[in-house]
Structure formats: structure tokens, C-alpha cells
Image (cartoon, rainbow, N blue to C red):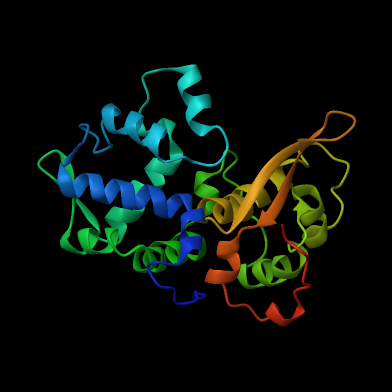
């Protein structure tokens, strides 16, 4: 498993990580008052609604979900479902008598964001099967060492998701369901990087109205990642 740079708790770029933010909020809330669970051990709707409006997740997650229904379950908000899984897996939270509670280690890490980031993000990026969270369930060929080192150079000035896909895999074949391949790349590589806070993804439309996405590195990328291609990164003027 790849490792991350060691950071201090006052590292300002940690604020770019939505997954870290959601984990801190959940652990802090559970440390104060246990969070209620359903019979299937999912977070109850009152906390799901609270998380939707407080996590400040990238994109329009809260607006889009609440526009469909004001009654929202944990499964309707995949980031919360993921955070719940990670906290239980890392033994930072536990289920007890119908509630989710922060463990002693969870309480400690909730006040140490750099340590919590180091605990959760490598697990999430490098060990979780991201295809399981994809609509198609399809994996993508490749590995994190290659993706990160290439993107370290190519994303310095930003790049569209389409261009990134072509960089790694070439032109899409003219065949039915070819869209599934770049979709898997987005779901298994780019979305995890966005949720970790290492890249930002912005939607755009070309002159024909076709939707695409621009991927750029956040300041957390440089603070968190130490890569073999660091010396090859061109120095763009940032504003």
C-alpha cells in the first residue's frame, strides 16, 4: 500500500478533504451523543439529514437528494454510507444497543485530523474495492502508482476527464456501451481522489452541449502525496 506524507494537525490543506470532514463531524457528534441506528444498523434518518446539510460534500449532493425526497436513508447518501463503513472497519466507531458510538481511539482521532486522515485515506484509496460503489460494478485496469504519478504531472494545469482517460487508455472504440470504460475510470479513480480531497472536479459543457469534467489538483495533493514524478511537475503560475 502506498504511503502518504506525514502532516501536522494544523495543516490547512486538510480542509480540502470532504471524507475527513465527514468523519470528524460523525465522530464528534457520536462522542457527544450516540447516533441512533435502524434495525439494519444504518444511521437513522435524522442523522442522515443532518449529515446531508453539514458535510458540504462536493457537487450538489445535498440539493439533488433532497429535491427528490425529504425522507432520506443512509443508502441514499453514499458518502455517509462509506464513512460509516470506514469508521467501523478501523474500530473508530462501534454499534452498541441500537446506536453508533465513537470508541476511545475514535474520540482521540476526531481531535487529530492529520492522524485521522492518515488512518482513513490510504485505506479508502488503496484498499477499498471502488467498483463495488459504482453503478455498473465494473473495475478499471491499472494501479494507483501509475495513475498518481502520471496525474501528478498531467494535472498540474488541469485536464478534462475525457483527456485523462485517453491519456491512460487511448481513444474509445466505436462500439455499444463503450461509455462504461470511462465511467469505470471516473468511479474507481477520479471520484475517490475527489472524495479524499486530492482533486477537484468541475462540470463543463462544450459548444455542442456535451458534458465533460475538468479535473485539477487541490493544495492537499502536494501536501499529502510524495511521488516519484515530483521533480517532473512543471511550475504553473497559480492565482
**Residue 135, horizontal then vertical, whole percent:** 57, 38
Residue 9, above or below 182: below
Residue 210 visible in the picture: yes
Residue 103 placement (x, y as % from top left): 17, 58
Relative placement, left or right, of 169 versus 11 is right
Of 202 and 2, nearer the camera is 202
Front residue (pair 79, 180): 79
Q: Nearer the viewer, residue 156 or 177?
A: 156
Residue 139 appears anywhere in the view = no
Instruction: Please state if 46 lies on the left or on the right of 210 as rendered.
Output: left
Q: Residue at x 50, y 47 (%)?
A: 132
Q: Quadrant of the C terminus?
A: bottom right
- Residue 121, image x and y in percent? 45, 62
Residue found at x 44% / y 51%? 19
Which residue is found at the position 87% from the left and 52% from the top? 171
Task: Name the image quarter holding residue 43.
Answer: top left
From the top left corner, tell me how far across and down residue 194 is, in percent.
Answer: 57, 52
Task: Name the image quarter holding residue 156.
Answer: bottom right
Amino acid at each position: 500500500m502506498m504511503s502518504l506524507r506525514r502532516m501536522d494537525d494544523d495543516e490547512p490543506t486538510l480542509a480540502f478533504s470532504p471524507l475527513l470532514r465527514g468523519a470528524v463531524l460523525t465522530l464528534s457528534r457520536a462522542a457527544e451523543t450516540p447516533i441512533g441506528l435502524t434495525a439494519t444498523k444504518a444511521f437513522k434518518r435524522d442523522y442522515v439529514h443532518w449529515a446531508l446539510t453539514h458535510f458540504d460534500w462536493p457537487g450538489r449532493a445535498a440539493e439533488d437528494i433532497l429535491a427528490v425526497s425529504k425522507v432520506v436513508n443512509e443508502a441514499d447518501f453514499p458518502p455517509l454510507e462509506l464513512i460509516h463503513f470506514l469508521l467501523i472497519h478501523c474500530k473508530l466507531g462501534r454499534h452498541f444497543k441500537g446506536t453508533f458510538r465513537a470508541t476511545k481511539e475514535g474520540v482521540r482521532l476526531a481531535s487529530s485530523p492529520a492522524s485521522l486522515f492518515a488512518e482513513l485515506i490510504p485505506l479508502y484509496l488503496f484498499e477499498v474495492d471502488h467498483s463495488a460503489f459504482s453503478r455498473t460494478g465494473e473495475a478499471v485496469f491499472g494501479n494507483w502508482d501509475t495513475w498518481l504519478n502520471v496525474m501528478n504531472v498531467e494535472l498540474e494545469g488541469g485536464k478534462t476527464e475525457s483527456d485523462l482517460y485517453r491519456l491512460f487508455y487511448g481513444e474509445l472504440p466505436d462500439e455499444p456501451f463503450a461509455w462504461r470504460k470511462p465511467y469505470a475510470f471516473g468511479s474507481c479513480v477520479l471520484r475517490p481522489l475527489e472524495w479524499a480531497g486530492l482533486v477537484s472536479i468541475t462540470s463543463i459543457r462544450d459548444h455542442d452541449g456535451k458534458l465533460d469534467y475538468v479535473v485539477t489538483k487541490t493544495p492537499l495533493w502536494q501536501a499529502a502525496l510524495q511521488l516519484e514524478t515530483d521533480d517532473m511537475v512543471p511550475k504553473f503560475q497559480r492565482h
